[in-house]
Amino acid sequence: MTNEEKILALLEQLQEGQKQLEEGQKRTEERLDRFEKRTDERFGKFDERFGRLEADMKSVKKDTKDIKHNLDYVWEDIKRIDNRLQNQEEKLERHVK
């Protein structure tokens, strides 16, 4: 085999190797694209769920604040009723004596 034939054979091998590398790169890019798409979909769902969770937390905070506020009113009513009942008991005790 002459030097020229050896060079041509090596060149052919290099070209085949380059072709295989390009095909491998293409497959890798396709896999990466699919992975990025799945990741984007998952993060999109995560962002959506996280947004709903934040909205739910705000709602719970508001409900808790409202309940606490209303509970203060209920507690004040209970104190008033208790005082009223105590006064009535005292009046009854005085009246009975």
Image (tube, rainbow, N blue to C red):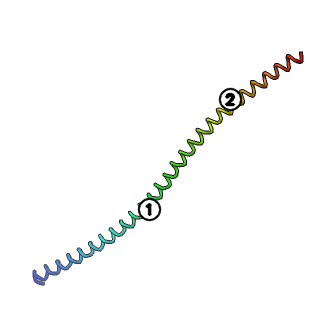
Q: Is residue 51 positioned above or below 21 on the image?
A: above
**Nearer to me, 51 or 10:** 51
Image quarter in which the C terminus is found = top right
Image quarter in which the N terminus is found = bottom left
Choose the circle earlier in sequence order: 2 or 1. 1
Q: Does dot 2 land on a helix, a strand or a loop?
A: helix
Residue 43's image quarter? bottom left
Q: Residue furthest bottom?
A: 1
**Nearer to me, 87 or 67:** 87
The span from disc 2 to disc 1 (Cα, nearest Å) is: 52 Å
Tell me which amino acid carries mark 2: Glu
Q: Which numbered circle lies on residue 76?
A: 2
Residue at image point 47% right, 58% down: 45
Residue 8's image quarter? bottom left
In the image, taking residue 7 as reference, residue 77 lies left or right, namely right
Q: Does dot 1 land on a helix, a strand or a loop?
A: helix
Residue at image point 72% right, 27% down: 80
In the image, taking residue 20 as reference, residue 39 lies left or right, namely right
Residue at image point 83% right, 19% down: 91
Residue at image point 23% right, 78% down: 16
Residue on which disc 1 sits? 41
Percent across and percent down for residue 10 are 17, 78
Q: Give the crowd class for mark 2: few <14, some 14-19, many >=20 residues within 10 Å.
A: few
Percent across and percent down for residue 79 are 71, 27
Residue 22's image quarter? bottom left
